[in-house]
Amino acid sequence: MIFLHDRLLHLPRVVSLHSCFSPSTDGHKIQSVSSEPLVQTTASASPVRYADVTKRYDGAQSDAVSHLDLEIPAGEICVMVGPSGCGKTTAMRMANRTVEMTSGDIFIGDRSVRDGDPAILRREIGYVIQQIGLFPHRTIAQNIGTVPKLLGWEKDRIRQRVIKLMDLIGLDPEYADRYPSQLSGGQQQRVGVARALAVDPPVMLMDEPFGAIDPINRSRLQNEFLRLQAEIDKTVLFVTHDVDEALKMGDRIAVMRKGGEVAQYATPTELLMEPADEFVEDFVGADRALKRLALLRVGDIDLWKAPLCQAGDPTEPVKEAVRRAEVPHAVLVDSEQRPMGWLSNRDLEGERVPEVPDSKPNPVLEARWTLRDGLANLLANGSQYAVVVDDNGRLQGVLSVEIISDFLASPEALEIDIPAVDRPHDD
Ligand code: ADP
Ligand code: MG
């Protein structure tokens, strides 16, 4: 039995850059965390638009944010990233009017944030900050229920909502009646997220939300938030000064420099592949090709085909296939298509393919690994080719250093763009 392995098709989660302005309609996404009617909100997510927004603080010599234009599609995570003092927090806080803009306007959906009472606006927009800002003398349940209570919800309804949110953030309900100081920093930060989500706001503002957490827990919280976002589908404005966090969390990233000026507003892929200027190039770092590879899975690109065969197959057709194939070596697979090893010329000298090949299939890469990890494995093993298997250990194709470098030089490298919630995470 000889067959050439089919090339991997691109998976449906790979989206085009140009379809990003409509809210996600993925079937698996639930639109709301609760079946309760939304309070003072109209949708699970709304687009946000900054229109020529400027802020000059009283007495300041220059603008903290100058003529900012930014459009964030509903349901996307927009990360504002840039050096300290460049105006990220100011830009974000004008959206819920905890800082009043000097000129310009910000729209949530088609409504200006200038219309109406800022106190009501703040209840409608989730807000998570680095210092967490939990009320120390209120229990976790009371903290999470702050806004529902302000809105006059019934006690039972608040309690139910709190339990649901605690479940959503993965916090045991037994913590409901504890106080913030009895929780770890990471747990407190989760409560901060739950509190911001309490009335299912169409927009979430997150200002360095994980900045004060140690690196391991930080990575965990980032992953958890991305999993959560896959369900709740909010429009998120996320501020960080850390470019790696921006690349991980952002569907789009606004790289800012002093004065809230946007140096580039683009997807992580575009930033890494085509930085607009030297400032952005420096900011994303010299290892941007590797960072690009970390945003993709091995299975996301076209792998090469190798001739496959099973023990006992006649060798003549295998040798013929090897002469014609992209990968000039045959892989021995078992009846489940699991790779058993590479066949050498010596293996093919007899009439039949042997049971035990000359070389083991090492390294075996998993299709769900990042391309960066795939490359690292190839290099560490000093191998030219590596077999790639799916979650069931079945052969998916063959990866080589050449495929990766060809990919990086191809238009595809710029086209394949995966939403933050669907990218590979390090967990
Ligand atoms: P970032 O969040 O990027 O670190 P900020 O938005 O906090 O930047 O600050 C931008 C600029 O505005 C800085 O120069 C900062 O000193 C100034 N600034 C921030 N808040 C105030 C304030 N309340 N009054 C006066 N100046 C401020
Ligand atoms: Mg800040």
Image (tube, rainbow, N blue to C red):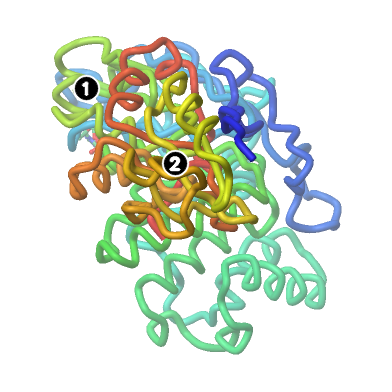
Of residues 56 and 197, which is closer to you in this image?
197
**Spot occupied by residue 202 in the image (x, y as percentages of width and height):** 66, 40
Depicted 227 relative to depicted 145: above or below: above
- Looking at marks 2 and 1 on the same chain, the residue that comes earlier in the sequence is marked by 2
Sort mark 2 into few (<14), some (14-19) or many (20+) by Cα contacts within 10 Å.
some
Residue found 39% across the figure and 70% down from its top: 186
Q: Is 301 displayed left or right of 234 in the figure? A: left
Q: CA distance from mark 2 to mark 1?
A: 22 Å
Identify which amino acid the numbered label 1 is placed on.
Arg
The local secondary structure at tag 1 comes to: strand
Callout 1 crowding tier (Cα within 10 Å): few <14, some 14–19, many ≥20: many
Determine whether, in the image, residue 109 is placed left or right of residue 58: right
Residue 181, by quadrant, is bottom left
Quadrant field for ligand 1? top left
In the rendering, which numbered label is found on residue 174? Answer: none
> Looking at the image, which residue is at 57% across and 30% down?
4
Q: Above or below — where is 299 with respect to 402?
A: below
Residue of label 1: 257
Residue 89: x and y in percent read 33, 38
Q: Residue at x 44, y 27 (%)?
A: 322
**Residue 366 at what x, y percent from top left?**
45, 50
Q: Is residue 278 rendered to the left or right of residue 205?
A: left
Indicate the position of residue 194 as horizontal and vertical percent values: 57, 63
Q: Quadrant of the N terminus?
A: top right
Q: Residue at label 2?
A: 98
Q: Is residue 224 above or below residue 370?
A: below
Which corner quadrant of the image does residue 382 belong to? top left
